[in-house]
Amino acid sequence: MIAFLVSTNRFEDILNVVHIHGHTGSTPQVKRTTGIISEIDRHVNIHLLESVDGNWNQHDGYDAMEYLLLKYPSIDAVIVDGDMAAVGAAQAIKSVGLSPGEDILVVSIDTWQEGLNAIVLGEINASVECSVEFGSKVFEVINNIEAGKTVDKVIFISEGHIFDITNAEDALMHWTR
C-alpha cells in the first residue's frame, strides 16, 4: 500500500498521510495500523499526521475524513481500512470541493464491490485485497483432520491483489463475493 503511494511519483518532498482505521482495539485494526506505521517509518518523506477510527463503514469514514480535513489543510493521501469507509472518505473530500483520487490520493484495504466501483469512478486510487482464501482453507484442514487425513504442518495462502484503474473494471465483471 505504501509502495503504491510511492510509485505514483507525485511526491518529491513530503507526503502528508492520514489513516482511517477500523474499530479501535479490534485485531484487524491493531495489526493493520501496526503494519502501516511500520512501513511509513521506513520512508523519511512520508509523515503520518493522524490515525482515527472510521469503524469500517461509510458514515464513520465520512465523519473521520471530514474531521481530518478540518484539522489538516495539507493532506496528500489517506489510507483507509475498509472500502466502505474509503467511499465515505471520498465523499467527504468531495464535500470540501476537492477531487478524491486526484487532489488527495485514496488507498483502501479489503476490496469490495463498492471499492472497485469507486476506483472505476476515479474516487479511490487503489484497494489492497485481503485474502478471502483463509476461511475455506481452514475448513478444508478441519474436514481433513476429522476424516483422519494427514495435513501439512505449514499451509501457504496466496497473497491478495492490488486493484487500481488498470484492473478494477475487469475485477467487477468477475465479482463473486
Image (tube, rainbow, N blue to C red):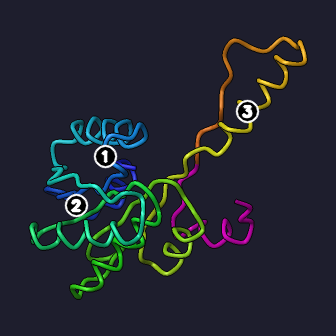
| Residue at 49% from the left image edge and 81% from the top image edge | 121
Seen from the viewer's position, the closer of residues 105 and 64 is 64
Residue 41 percent location from the top left of the image: 21, 37
Q: Is residue 119 left or right of residue 17?
A: right
| Residue at 82% from the left image edge and 17% from the top image edge | 145
Mark 3 in CB contact with mark 2 (< 8 angstroms): no
Tag 2 secondary structure: loop
Mark 1 in CB contact with mark 2 (< 8 angstroms): no
Q: Is residue 176 magenta?
A: yes
- Badge 2: residue crowd in 10 Å (few <14, some 14–19, many ≥20): some
Q: Nearer the viewer, mark 3 or mark 1?
A: 1
Residue 78 percent location from the top left of the image: 29, 61
Q: Which residue is mark 3?
A: 137
- Badge 3: residue crowd in 10 Å (few <14, some 14–19, many ≥20): some
Residue type for callout 2: Phe
Q: Which residues are magenta?
A: 161-177
Residue type for callout 1: Thr
Q: Cα distance, mark 1 to mark 2?
A: 30 Å
Residue 149 percent location from the top left of the image: 88, 14
Where is 15 relative to 58, above or below? above
Residue type for callout 3: Lys
Mark 3 vs 2, N-terminal side = 2
Q: Dividing the picture into quarters, in which one does residue 154 lie? A: top right
Q: Which residue is mark 2?
A: 11
| Residue at 55% from the left image edge and 75% from the top image edge | 117
Label of residue 34 in the image? none
Residue 38 percent location from the top left of the image: 28, 35
Tag 1 secondary structure: loop
Label of residue 24 in the image? 1
Q: Is residue 5 left or right of residue 110?
A: left
Q: Cα distance, mark 3 to mark 2?
A: 40 Å
Mark 3 in CB contact with mark 1 (< 8 angstroms): no
